[in-house]
Amino acid sequence: MRLGVLDIGSNTVHLLLVDAHPGARPVPFASHKRPLSLVAYLDGEGAINEEGQHELISFVREAWASAGLHQAEDMLAFCTSATREAANGTEGLERVHRETGVVLDELTGAQEAAMTLVAVRRWYGWGAGTILDFDIGGGSFEMAIGHDEQPDVATSVPLGAGRLTRDWLPGDLPSAKHMREAQDYIRATLEAAVSEFDGAGRPDLTVGTSKTFRSLARITAAAPSAAGPYVRRELRRRDLGLWTHRLAAMPVAGRANLPGVSEIRAPQLLAGAMVAHTAMELFKVEVMQICPWALREGLILKRFDHLLSDSESPVRPVGTGPVGRALRPVPAPRTAGVPVR
């Protein structure tokens, strides 16, 4: 069957269409995305302003029509930290539903971490042992550890690369004072979070997921995306430390010219490197592998698990919160207006 996954993130809004069936590897069919940094549309009260809400609604309409055009049979739609933490997040989600007919499920940070670990576990298999996963988004940083598919510990902290850049690293070349203050904040925030992992044991494998980790690995000489997903890619703490100093002295235009770094990610790369390096230091990780699967794939795999089990209840990753609804089939787009459920 063809499944659509609508991901409202902090840096981009993305519709991914995949073909798969229960027990099979999901194969990407089509992708439709737009750069949309929702944190850039926050007003002084921390609410997503009218322009940001308009952009979000516009994309959701496009995504819904695209899913119908490509004959998607089912769709998961979710949002993460930028919407979750906005002062008007609930009202914004209600407006999206009212104007598009699409219900966006709001994932907690712990659910994001848990579902990402599902994807990582499926990629590396049971032979990987205990896995520690890091995922840096635009608004938050998720961490999870587990020797099974479900995490023993899963947590999220407000250390997303976009958020840190906006709040702590202003300008093209942040000053030494801003760098020092940002580093102190990152370390203090992570030290509190890392203490939650006391007693979880040492991981057999540490993994980085998300575009930020892929970009950091690429600038430290990992294989390009064109080499395919099965090439082993690593990120070493020693190399990352050297590159963090280089990025601090490099203007945004220079970062955008680095291999594997997009124009939209370039301003945030320094903040991402600082978080990644500090996390590796606090967890005493010298090298991590880069996994091509992350949150979206975890949701897809759990959705197909649900289909395989013939259960009518929504998939639930951790606790009692829903990951995605058992959705009605996506209709073909209408010639006028936007199709709704």
Image (spheres, grey):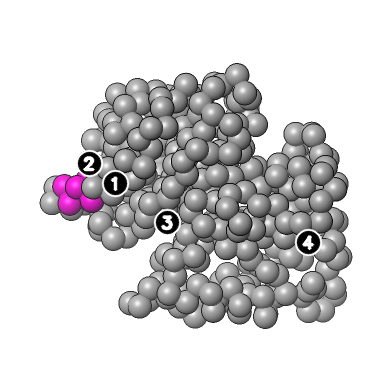
Q: Earlier in the sequence, mark 2 or mark 4?
A: 2
Please tell me how crowded label 1 is: few (under 14), some (14-19), or many (20+) other residues with Cα within 10 Å: few
What's the CA distance linking mark 2 and mark 1? 29 Å
Measure the alpha-carbon separation of dots 2 and 4: 49 Å
Q: Which residue appears at 16% of the width and 47% of the height? A: 180
For the residue marked with disc 2, what is the amino acid? Ala
Name the residue beneath numbered marker 1. 192
Residue under numbered circle 2:
249
At a point 40% along the width and 44% down the height, the residue shown is: 256
Q: Earlier in the sequence, mark 3 or mark 2?
A: 3
Q: Are marks 3 and 4 in contact (CB under 8 Å)?
A: no
Task: Give the dominant element type of the magenta stretch: helix, strand or loop.
Answer: helix
Amino acid type for the residue under numbered disc 3: Gly
Label 2 environment density (alpha carbons within 10 Å; few <14, some 14–19, many ≥20): some
Give the camera-side residue of 138 and 325: 325
Q: Quick check: 151 left or right of 303?
A: left
Number of the label disc, if any, that sits on residue 139: 3
Q: CA distance from mark 3 to mark 4?
A: 27 Å
Viewer-nearest of discs 3 and 2: 3
Task: Read off the magenta span.
Answer: 179-186
Q: Secondary structure at mark 2?
A: loop
Quadrant holding the C terminus: bottom right
Q: Residues within 10 Å of mark 4 (few under 14, many from 20)?
A: some
Look at the image and say whether residue 260 sits in the magenta stretch.
no
Mark 2 vs mark 4: in front: 4
* Residue in front for this viewpoint, 319 or 207: 319
Q: Which circle's residue, 2 or 1, is located before the other in the chain?
A: 1
Q: Is residue 100 above or below residue 218?
A: below
Return the mark for residue 60: none
